[in-house]
Amino acid sequence: MIEYDYVVVGTGVSGLSFALEASKHGSVAVITKRASENSNTSWAQGGICCVADDNDSFESHIKDTIDAGAGLCDYDVVKTIVESAPDAIDKMVNIGVQFDKNSNGNYELGKEGGHSQRRVLHSKDTTGKEISEKLILSAQSSKNIKIFEHHFAIDVVTTEKLGISGTNQVAGIYALNESTGEILTFRSDNVILCTGGCGRVYLYTTNPDIATGDGLAMAYRAGAEISNMEFIQFHPTCLYHHELKNFLISEAVRGEGAKLIGKDGKEFMHKYDPRGSLAPRDIVARAIDHEIKKTGEPCVYVDIRHKTKEYIEDRFPNIYKTCLSVNIDPAKDPIPVVPAAHYQCGGVKTDVNGKTSINGLYAIGEVACTGLHGANRLASNSLLEGAVMAFRAIQDINSVSKNTREKRNDFVIPDWTSGEAEDVDELVVIYHNWDEIRRLMWDYVSIVRTNKRLKRAATRLLNLKKEVQEFYWNFKICSELLELRNLVETATLVVNCAQKRKESRGLHYTLDFPETDRCENPNNTVIKLQK
């Protein structure tokens, strides 16, 4: 059993920002199932929101966020995070993050869908990579932080699971050392889940392979409340090409004047929203889905040919280079795109400090549902949320929680035992189930839903869950099995939440309830494991 003051799961902006702040107060273990740079953060292209121009205001940013959130944003949470943005940016700059500036030395601000002003700070079109690299370097240089790469967090351990009386609180986690197969026990009164989203639950996604809903599934199994998982954001513009199936064409491209066009070369977004190609993502994704089904074409196109080659190459070097690698020249050719699963707006239910319904268990970033995003995330608010919530969480742990939570330093978490479990003999079974989950989620639970489709998905997922559970208990665990277990759990949560919402709102659109309930205080969907 290894003891730390803080155990963090994930090495994105949320996890490493928290770790750096927490290292000033104690020892920090950071656990990640791949290398440190493998995170959703490092894939982020567009940038991070912050009011940084005299023509902009916090009030405007708050309004844009709430408008995009389709009535489900928590105003106080939105206000807190938006107003904390300048401080979060300063902290990033202090560790060496470089955002693009203009000739006057001011931040060069981008504009994306749903924004009324330019307020997106960026580092070309690889902002997340820049932030990730500087956070990793800072964490590696800290004496109080130890990063456990290639360690897969299996489950959260709570005092309730250990049979200890009193208020339920976190006790630590079990994690698989992927190199040796050994199961390690991490003991801590503070476990912080920063595991990102669940894009890989769908057949087509802009997310990296690591996005399998691990933190969400762990929190649910531990008994934490889960909220609003019906709201899965589909990014409108994923590159449509057989060689590159999850490469994102950033919304920032449309922010610089690119238009969405059909094969006939004509724009179509004005038929769906007066904001055209810069409407919020839920509207644009549904519009593209409708156009594809109406015309029978496999994709639509992003057209930025009004800009020069030099401009595109300088502003979007990664996109330009990647498109050229598959013989698409954005300066001459429209870029073929389709919607793909991108971001979960629901997650582990937390307060404005990242605190979950289990004492000592925190969730930060995409894995959490704070109330910032509501029913649809405003572009580039994600990195902002992760950075701000990381600082708020450590402040909360070291103030209120420290004085009110019951300390339990006098017990031992038992070692993991595999019993008579055997080695996995046929990984093909895991891959088959993985593929089936992703296909049924894409076919039945994607951009447009119906009661019948959701029911079919729920029925099949129930059977798959039983199969996976049997597999889990009969065989020694490996990373592939753990991901499958989390994937089927997460898919089930998405479907269950979707079945509970009897309206269309934001990212949840169903043909059986096409209208939005106009009640003054719409409900959030909340699910908890029934014991």
Image (tube, rainbow, N blue to C red):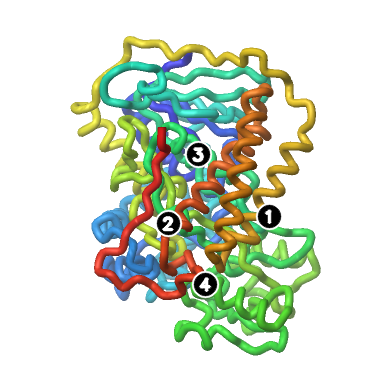
Identify the amino acid type marked 3.
Answer: Ala
Q: Point out residue 101 in the picture as x, y percentages from the top left corner.
A: 46, 64
Q: Residue at x 52, y 12 (%)?
A: 415
- Report helix, strand or loop for mark 2: helix
Q: Is residue 34 visible?
A: no
* Mark pair 2, 4: CA separation: 15 Å
Instruction: Specify which label sits upstream in the sequence, 3 or 4.
Output: 3
Instruction: Determine crowd level at label 3: few under 14, some 14-19, many 20+ residues with C-alpha closer than 10 A.
Output: many
* Mark pair 1, 3: CA separation: 20 Å
Which of the two marks, 3 or 4, is nearer to us in this view?
A: 4
* Mark pair 2, 3: CA separation: 19 Å
Q: Point out residue 333 in the picture as x, y percentages from the top left corner.
A: 73, 78
Q: Residue at x 68, y 55 (%)?
A: 439
Q: Nearer the viewer, residue 66 or 38?
A: 66
* Mark pair 3, 4: CA separation: 29 Å
Q: Residue at x 47, y 36 (%)?
A: 138
Instruction: Determine crowd level at label 4: few under 14, some 14-19, many 20+ residues with C-alpha closer than 10 A.
Output: few
Tag of residue 154:
none
Instruction: Specify which label sits upstream in the sequence, 2 or 3.
Output: 3
* Mark pair 1, 2: CA separation: 22 Å
> In the image, 320: left or right of 397?
right
Name the residue that disc number 2 marks: 500
Identify the amino acid type marked 2.
Answer: Lys
Name the residue that disc number 3 marks: 217
Instruction: Specify which label sits upstream in the sequence, 1 or 3.
Output: 3
Instruction: Specify which label sits upstream in the sequence, 2 or 4.
Output: 2
Tag of residue 439:
1
> In the image, 252: left or right of 224?
right
